[in-house]
Amino acid sequence: MEQKTRVLIVEDDMIIASNISLQLTKIGYEVTGIETRGEEAVIHSRLNKPDVILMDINLKGRLDGIETVRKIKAVSEIPVIYITANNDEATFEEAKKTQPFAFVDKPITMRELTRSLALAAEQLKKREDTEEDEEEYVALLNDRIFIRHQGQMVKLMLKDILYVEADRNYCNLITEKKNYVLATTLKDMQLKLPDTLFVRVHRSFVVNISKLDVLGEGHVEIKRKVIPLSRSYRDELLKHLQTI
């Protein structure tokens, strides 16, 4: 069975958001959720990553839609379709800097929205097929690791890796300066990293324990990134921390 395209709806008008969700579900999309604030959308996109995000530009709260997209794309390159009732040129130019897939004007017509989503899903599939065709290469050498990223061999110092996050059959390797999407599972990636430094703390996260800033009861923090800590991994983490 073909996997459904997963869509996150970020819209502070719940009537509009619920209608979009209902219509998309009817025609075969999987809606991962509806968020009304940018802060919640950032968290949602990291814990339950969608394939495409529908983003209202004029969100209420601390983060507007454009700033929310910037924060999301700092970690994951997820295609974004902006929904907007604001047609001024300055807003459009600022939104363009985040490299969205499309803009859909309000009032929304489902025909325009579903066409944009279908095109975004097609581009996403092509990108995934390209990544699958390119065998991922990961090699460890003393204090550094070499990975094949976008057709090039990249050297990363182990000390610069903050954490690795699972994304289905891929994983995101996060450093202070850049993020890398690798066509390998988190389990396989963990096996390639030294277990004296990199420890599993959750089914979706492996962390560099030398980078931990906070160890809480149910979470850890690295550079203000809150990472869940599962009870089943907590004892193993504490044991490793005692050895460094």
Image (spheres, grey):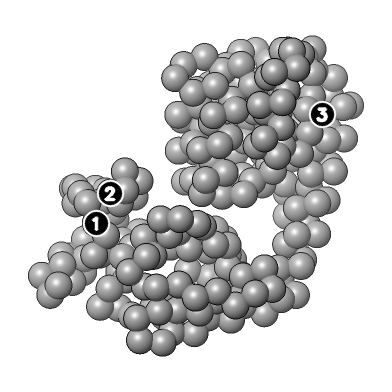
Give percent across and percent down for residue 72. Answer: 54, 40
User: SS for tag 1?
Assistant: loop
The residue lying at 58 percent from left, 62 percent from top is 181
Q: Quadrant of residue 127?
A: bottom right
Badge 1, how many Cα within 10 Å: few under 14, some, many 20+?
some
Q: Mark 3 or 2 closer to N-term?
A: 3
Q: CA distance from mark 2 to mark 1?
A: 6 Å
Q: Quadrant of the C terminus?
A: bottom left
Give percent across and percent down for residue 19. Answer: 71, 19
Badge 2, how many Cα within 10 Å: few under 14, some, many 20+?
some
Q: Mark 3 or 1 closer to N-term?
A: 3
Q: Which residue is mark 2?
A: 221
Instruction: Say whether residue 116 is left or right of residue 188.
Output: right
The residue lying at 59 percent from left, 38 percent from top is 32
Q: CA distance from mark 3 to mark 2?
A: 38 Å
Amino acid type for the residue under numbered disc 1:
Leu
Amino acid type for the residue under numbered disc 2:
Glu
Q: Quadrant of residue 6?
A: top right
